[in-house]
Structure formats: C-alpha cells, structure tokens
Amino acid sequence: MLWKKFAKDWLYFSRKERLGIYIMSALITLLWVLPVFFSTESDPIRPLNITAVQIDSLEHVLIKREKKEIKNFKQFAVKNKTEYTGYKEFNHPVAKKLEIIDINKADSIDFEKLTGIGEKLSARMVKYRERLGGYYKIEQLKEIYGMQDSNFIKFKHLIKVQTDFKPNQIYINRASYSELRQHPYLSHLFVKSVLAYIKMHGFISGEDELFKIGSISQDEVMRVLPYLDFAQ
C-alpha cells in the first residue's frame, strides 16, 4: 500500500545510520550528566570565602569611615559659612494686618483709604455723621448720596461701630420744631405728629407711645430710636 511505501522510505535506516544515531545519543547524554559530578558552586552565603569575623571587621571600618566623612562635611559647611559673608537672607513676606476703621472716629483721610471712596464721598461721610449724631450701624453709610452698594460690599469688612458706642441724643419732649427737624431722620410729618401728641398728652414716655401715633410708621420709629431721649 502507499502508506507502507512512505513509511519504508522515511523511517527505515541503514546499519551505519543506526550506529551514528546511537553514538550521538550517548554523547548528548554524557554532556548532560558530566556537570552534575564536576559542579564548582560556591557557598551562596559567603561567595568570596570571607569569614564572619572578617565581615564584622569590614562593617566596623565602613561605619567609622562614614562617620568621619560626615564630620568633615559639617566642618566644611561651618567653615565656609563663617568665611563667606555674601549670602542673602531670604525674608518671607509677612501679610499686613488689615486695619479696621471705626466710622465714628475716622476722618476724611481715613475714609479715603477704603475702596471706591474719593475725596468728595469721604467728606460726605464725615458730614452725615455729624448731622446724625454718630453712626450706630455701618449700613447707615449706604444712605449717603453717591454711595453705591457695590462699593460698600468691597469695604464693609474693614469698618466697624464700637458695640458700646452711644450716639448723640435729642430730648424729644423738650426740643422745638426746628431742633427736631435738624436731624435727617425726623421728617416734617414726624415732627408735627410728635409735637401734637405732646401738646395733647403732656409728654412721650417711650417708644411704645411713639408706636401709638398713627401718622408715624413703625420703621420710622425704629430708625430714629437710638437718637431719642425721653427724659421730661
């Protein structure tokens, strides 16, 4: 058959060919076995045949040399620092502490330090304070002509009113029409209503009675209260 002929042609070896295969196999086996009997591996722990005493001695020498080099370096650094005077000291910038302005003590120059406040507006801030008798809250600055909310927001964290500050007060039961009208918060209708009530009842004992006057709004009363003294 065809496959038998194929096997005979490719798998059949002559006597000489078989002898060559045997010899080659023996040589390959010999080359593989010989290294096992003639191995020269060294001790992995001490590859250079150095004793434990020698290792300790070497470590001692290395440590001693390292300490000496560190000492020499420190001496060099100190020596060079003292001999050379051209080093520049670096000063870290220190943030300036924000100065808070007391709006009842500040002058126009102080107000001009605030963002968006010029010469004219700072003068108005001082003048309005005098007319009021002092500021009892910082928001009163927004009542000044020319004061923009956008500007006020920028500097409101830099201004204050002392918590124990007491503005100048008006004796409401004793003051005349003209005296009362000098205050920016006391309108013509407010003053006329107050004087009419005093004429009818003799005096105003306190804020509760002001709220009873129908022609005066509650907001008007609350706004002006810090400037009123109800003494008879």
Image (cartoon, grey):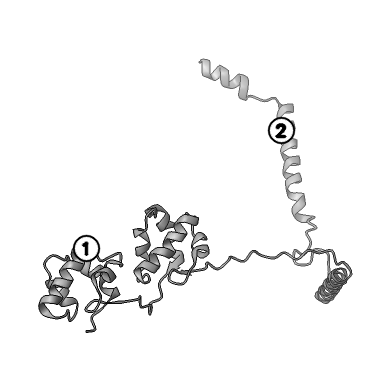
Say whether residue 188 is left or right of residue 99: left
Determine the CA span between mark 2 and mark 1: 134 Å
The image quadrant where one finds the C terminus is bottom left
Q: Nearer the viewer, residue 73 or 130?
A: 130
Element marked by disc 1:
helix
Say which amino acid is labelled 2.
Answer: Ile
Element marked by disc 2:
helix
Q: Nearer the viewer, residue 108 or 172?
A: 172
Relative to 2, is 112 above or below?
A: below
Q: Residue 74's spot in the image, x, y percent?
A: 83, 72
Say which amino acid is labelled 1.
Answer: His
The numbered disc on residue 21 is 2
Say whether residue 164 is left or right of residue 67: left
Q: Residue 109's spot in the image, x, y percent?
A: 53, 63
Label 1 Cα neighbours within 10 Å, binned few <14 / some 14-19 / many ≥20: few
Q: Quadrant of residue 21?
A: top right
Q: Quadrant of residue 169?
A: bottom left
Residue carrying label 1: 188
- Depth check, mark 2 against mark 1: the one in front is 1
Say whether residue 82 is left or right of residue 188: right
Lower sequence index among marks 2 and 1: 2
Q: What residue lies at 81% left-to-right and 76% top-to-bottom?
A: 56
Relative to 40, is 220 above or below?
A: below
Asked whether residue 203 appears in the rendered view, the answer is yes
Q: Nearer the viewer, residue 190 or 176?
A: 176
Q: Nearer the viewer, residue 72 or 85?
A: 85
Q: What residue lies at 13% left-to-right and 65% top-to-bottom?
A: 215
Q: What residue lies at 39% left-to-right and 68% top-to-bottom?
A: 130
Label 2 Cα neighbours within 10 Å, binned few <14 / some 14-19 / many ≥20: few
Q: Residue 48's spot in the image, x, y percent?
A: 83, 64
The numbered disc on residue 63 is none
